[in-house]
Amino acid sequence: MRAQNVLKELAPELTGEQPPNGSWSPSRDLLRVLTAQRLATARNCGPRTLREIVDWAKGYGVTIEPVIQPGGSLSQMWGELIANASAGALTSAEIVGALERSIRRKSVRIPIAFQLVLVKIIMSSIE
């Protein structure tokens, strides 16, 4: 039910589709244009709902690749990203995904080590 409600909210914006009240199944077109990044910022779409939508899409033969690994705490996520940055393997998609997840959870805490990574990235793009 949660997944259906999130998809009903996204359908008009992504495909122009107007879902009816009550029971409804998303169109294949809607599932194809969905991205994990869009779901991560969707209203009322937490990790459990995200998994339900990804599973629903699989049932239609559509794969939605996660931007970052689902589950775990924010501190665990930040730790993994800091480790990736130290190894030189951090992607912009991971940065965006982490920040969006943090925003969605209304977290105001970003570890200092990750802030330093962001400063280095910004400074290198300015120079």
Image (cartoon, rainbow, N blue to C red):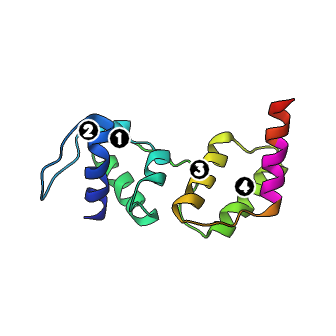
For label 4, the SS is: helix
Task: Name the N-terminal-most of marks 2 and 1.
Answer: 2
Task: State yes or no: discs 3 and 4 in contact (Cβ < 8 Å).
Answer: no
Task: Name the N-terminal-most of marks 3 and 1.
Answer: 1
Instruction: Give the CA separation, mark 2 to mark 1.
Output: 8 Å
Circle 2 residues within 10 Å: few <14, some 14–19, many ≥20: few
Q: Is residue 105 magenta?
A: no
Q: Residue 81 placed where, x, y %? A: 72, 55
Above or below residue 48? Residue 33 is above
The mark found on residue 81 in the picture is: 4
Instruction: Give the CA separation, mark 2 to mark 3.
Output: 24 Å
Q: Quadrant of the C terminus?
A: top right
What's the magenta region? 113-120
The amino acid type of the residue labelled 4 equals Leu
The amino acid type of the residue labelled 3 equals Gly
Residue for badge 2 = 28
For label 3, the SS is: helix
Task: For marks 3 and 4, give the one nearer the viewer.
Answer: 3
Residue beneath the point at 30% across and 64% down: 2
